[in-house]
Amino acid sequence: MKAIVKIKKHTVRRAIILISLVILTLAALLFPRFVSPAAAEVYSGRIFPYIAMPANLVSGLVQTSVTEAVVVVGAPTLLVLVIIFTVKVIKKALLGRGAREYVYKVSRNALVIALVMSIIFSFMHALNYRRYPARQLMELYGGDYTFDDYEKALNWAYLGMISARSDLGEDFAGVAHMNNSFENNVSYANMLVSDVLGGYGINVSNEIIRAKPVALSHYWSMFGIVGMYDMFLGESNINTDYIDITEFPITVCHEILHAKGFARETDCNMLAAICCIRSSRPDFRYAGYYQIFWSLYPIVTEYAASEGRELYEYTNDKNIQPVFADTRARMKYWDNIHHESDRILDMLGIDLEQIGENANDAFLEANGQEGGTDTYEVPYSVYVDFYKQYVEETDA
């Protein structure tokens, strides 16, 4: 009888331990949602840089992507461990030799790891979702702008894009490329982000983020991934399969912004574009103005049609032809990637692009970013706000 009571107490204690670990893990994941934006802003700007510093220092010791190594080695290792676990459980159950004890220990250890990872995730990324939106930090509150306002902003972006593009060299096909090495571009992007945002009074980490090129970049492209911030290692990873001058500076700045304390995709894209147009380098300026121009162009075109107004035919301007050459080169690359993905879909029935889209969408939705991957899109009015407040008023 005593033995039975002892066994029951032992079982209850184990159940309490497992349930407690589950509750603590959920609490670690959910507590950032209860943090006020004001508190999160203080954390992101003043505390997060010190929290992230150890991971940044360790990651910065090696040139290669630690994230990639973990995925390449960890995925098959995890599969092997699952197989070993399954085999052992079956074997112990058949022989009657402590299957429950083994399952409990593995479950406990797995939950401890999950708890630690949840804590790291919350402090390295989730809390940064709670800070004030970048639009608010820059006091871009929006306005009831006229067509003339939109047209002026579009023309400003166009002239900036054309001017920067004219300062770039070309290859034999008339396509422009980045002016420096990957490491140089990353180092420069770090300085650019810190200097520009600091100039606008935005708290941002001055820690140097050593963004890493990914060896398996071609396969990342097949999943639609151009960059990824690993919050567990504090590492920014960049797809280098095709270093497209119209997107690469934005991507590098975007991922560095994640590592410097900004979680929202919209914020990172907007701030990356603004940082780029404030650059002294034409390749970075070109990418920034390129993003802003093509964000505004379809909207202003619609606006002109609805207002019965004439809009300058930018796409027929001879000065934009070099820009089209860069765009065609990018589209050709992604067309080839889509064809490869389609072949895999036909052969294996696996839609890699959709898998990448669904995974990213689920991650963003789980972190309160309603709309999922749609949150990468920057509201076009933000750029009009920026033009009116920081460009037109300065020039007036």
Image (cartoon, rainbow, N blue to C red):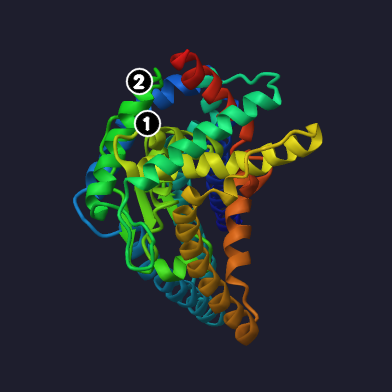
Q: Mark 2 highlights which residue?
A: 199
For discs 2 and 1, the disc positioned in front in the rendered view: 1
Q: Residue at x 50, y 63 (%)?
A: 328
Could you give the CA–CA distance between mark 2 and mark 1, rounded to whole angstroms?
Answer: 11 Å
Q: Position of residue 32 (x, y in %)?
A: 54, 31
- Residue drawn at x 64%, y 21% is 142
Q: Provide residue 94's location: percent of width, then percent of height.
A: 56, 82
Q: Are marks 2 and 1 in contact (CB under 8 Å)?
A: yes
Q: Is residue 126 visible?
A: no
In-front residue for pair 176/159: 159
Q: Is residue 314 left or right of residue 269?
A: right
Asked whether, in this view, residue 370 is left or right of residue 221, the answer is right
Label total for image: 2
Q: Amino acid at mark 1?
A: Arg
Q: Quadrant of the N terminus?
A: bottom right
Callout 1 secondary element: loop
Q: Which residue is mark 1?
A: 278
Mark 2 falls on what kind of element? helix
Q: Which quadrant would residue 384 be assigned to in this image?
A: top right
Q: Residue furthest bottom?
A: 347
Q: Residue 62, how many percent across, how many down?
A: 20, 55
Residue in front for this viewpoint, 344 or 261: 344
> Which amino acid, by three-letter code, is at mark 2?
Gly
